[in-house]
Image: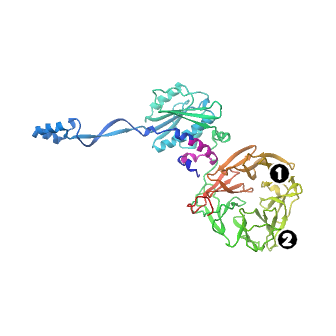
Amino acid sequence: MQLPESLQPWRDWLQWFAPAQLPLFADLFGRLDPLLGPLRGQQQGGVPEPDGLADLQRRGPYERLLSSEWLLADEVPDEFLRRAVVGEHLFLAPQYRSHQASRLMVVLFDAGPLQLGAARLVHMALLILLARRAKDAGAELRWGILQQAPELHALDSAAQLKRLLSARTFKTVDAGHWQAWRDGLNAQPEPVGECWLVGQRLPATEGLPCSHRVQVSRSLDGRSLSVALHAAGARRVSLPLPDERLALQLLKGHFEGEVVAAAPTAKGRVPRVSLTLQPVISSAGTHVALKLLGEPGMVVIKLPVHNQKKPLEIRKSLWSAQQTALAATFNGKALGAVLSDQWQLTFWSMPGLKPVDKPGLEELKLPPGTASLLPVAGLRNKSTGRLFLLDGQGHLAFWVVETGRTPANPKTRRTHRLAADVLSMAKVDSDVVVYARREGDRLHTHSVNADGDVTAAHVVGLANQVDQVLFAASPLWRRGFGGCAVLRISDGCESWGVVSAKGAASEIERIVLAPGWKGIGLLQEDNERYSLLLLAPNQHAIAVYCEGGQRVLFSTAAPIVKYSFCPLSGVIAVLTKARELLVYAVPQRLLRLQIICNEHPENKDGSDA
């Protein structure tokens, strides 16, 4: 997992959490870490013990007087006395060994009713902060629960954090609990260096071995937490209450295993890629392609399987430098592209599609250069096939694959118009492409197969003020309607109407997003559930809205500049300003890949220079 620089000191422990939960810890660590103060266990202590001889010195007791000085007393008594008066005698100086203060650090938590809710997140953050504090000092950290019998635990896995969160009780801390722990700590084979008590209304510990007391309490207005540390002095910090959804997720212990680290990394092997074109995902969700920077072509990355140990399979696919890529798509594992020059359209690495004369602007508007690849989808069966492309003016065109088995109808080597006023187009099944178009004041959807058979219009609703349509992949599209989501802008916010594949042609759910959130994909999951994928306002996170609730799937350290979603595989690929590629499988809630696509890290401004 790639972490922001501010969280790198706690990397060993934060790897247990999903990326979406890291911003919460970044805020807690930033506020709590300065509160802790210096480590007491690093100082020397105890009564020094003699450990041999060190040197000669002019002062000392006469039992350590050098032997040669005593010989002088026998032979020249006056000289001996003179040297004694002026301090010229030499004495043996002993070597002392200092005691090192104990390196055992103990933190005891109040798990009672006064510490329920957000206070438990502070406990978890403090435990991680103290674990790093102990590691830096070469110390050992152990923790326990004040209301339980004296038993110390190490923090060596996420299971220990779950144990801390699950240790809830209705008993408040009293003097008896602390007395039991005091006896337990005194019985430890190694004396305790630092002892931390964390909770609220903690028992009196004057004269007892407790070096730090941390009081965690909710403010009177219920909008913040107050954390007060009492050690050599007193320090206090106020913490805002965390996001309720994330807090509830963590308090339930849902932070381990939901996102796995990308298997093999390939930093230094993946060529530098452009930030101007979105990733291309194969229909099976097994490959991702990115536009190369400074080279006419794309880099194709095969996504790793679970627990893959061998290096990533990465290859370059290059075309002529005189041609511009208008669209790209996968035909199985092979990447193909629609290329343009001044006179022709060429179908690179697409068997059966021959070059055609470049259509006029009234037929198909193909800009000489584009900041985004045009939507394209290919279908093929045993006898024929078609490649569909949607331009920026709502023109849906197609070209027929030349197989030689049966006479092609319509003709090959020509550009054909399928529909106009098209809003959206997508591949939703292995042999079905669907599109939505305006017809009068109505919004219709159609599906088409490789033979060119178009289904009858399915009325989705009124076409007025509709800005975009997202399609859910479903085999139902083969014979009719398979489900979609329709976008309208309301008061500057996106408002999505989800239309189910079953029942009447009407919205089953209206999703009004918060300002700045953007819908980018629709996925049909089990039991006819529809999940709307979202891009966060700050471009640092991908979320999902499902069954009335919204949750973050993953977050990124740098802003997301390009993204793609494949409704067939449920895979989303995002490219950040730092040229980091993240590929996430939404149905499995699994991070498939996370790599830096940059062979030349010296340019860190995120530009394509």
Looking at the image, is mark 1 or mark 2 earlier in the sequence? Answer: 2
Residue ranking furthest to the right: 440
- Residue in the image at 61% along x and 30% along y: 114
Q: Are marks 1 and 2 in contact (CB under 8 Å)?
A: no
Q: Does 354 appear above or below 585? A: below
Disc 1, SS? loop
Q: Examine the residues drawn in magenta and state their main secondary structure.
A: helix
Check disc 1 and give the amino acid type: Ala
Q: Is residue 165 left or right of residue 406?
A: left
Of 272 and 180, the residue lying toward us: 272
Q: Pointer 1: what residue?
A: 501
Q: Quick check: can you spot residue 383?
A: no
Q: Position of residue 593 (x, y in %)?
A: 63, 56
Q: Position of residue 482 (x, y in %)?
A: 82, 54
Q: Position of residue 31 (x, y in %)?
A: 56, 40
Q: Quick check: can you spot residue 57?
A: yes
Q: Is residue 94 left or right of residue 168?
A: left
> Cα distance, mark 1 to mark 2?
31 Å
Specify start and end residues of the magenta stretch as a single range: 10-30
Residue ranking furthest to the top: 175
- Residue in the image at 62% along x and 43% along y: 24
Q: Find residue 76 and report its image quarter.
A: top left
Of 132 and 218, the residue lying toward us: 218
Q: Is residue 547 left or right of residue 201?
A: right
20 magenta-colored:
yes
Q: Position of residue 162 (x, y in %)?
A: 60, 39
421 magenta-colored:
no
Q: Does 578 appear above or below 51? A: below
Q: Find residue 463 and report its image quarter.
A: bottom right
Of 390 and 235, the residue lying toward us: 235
Q: Pointer 2: what residue?
A: 410
At label 2, counting other C-alpha atoms closer than 10 Å, the crowd grade (few under 14, some 14-19, many 20 or more) is: few
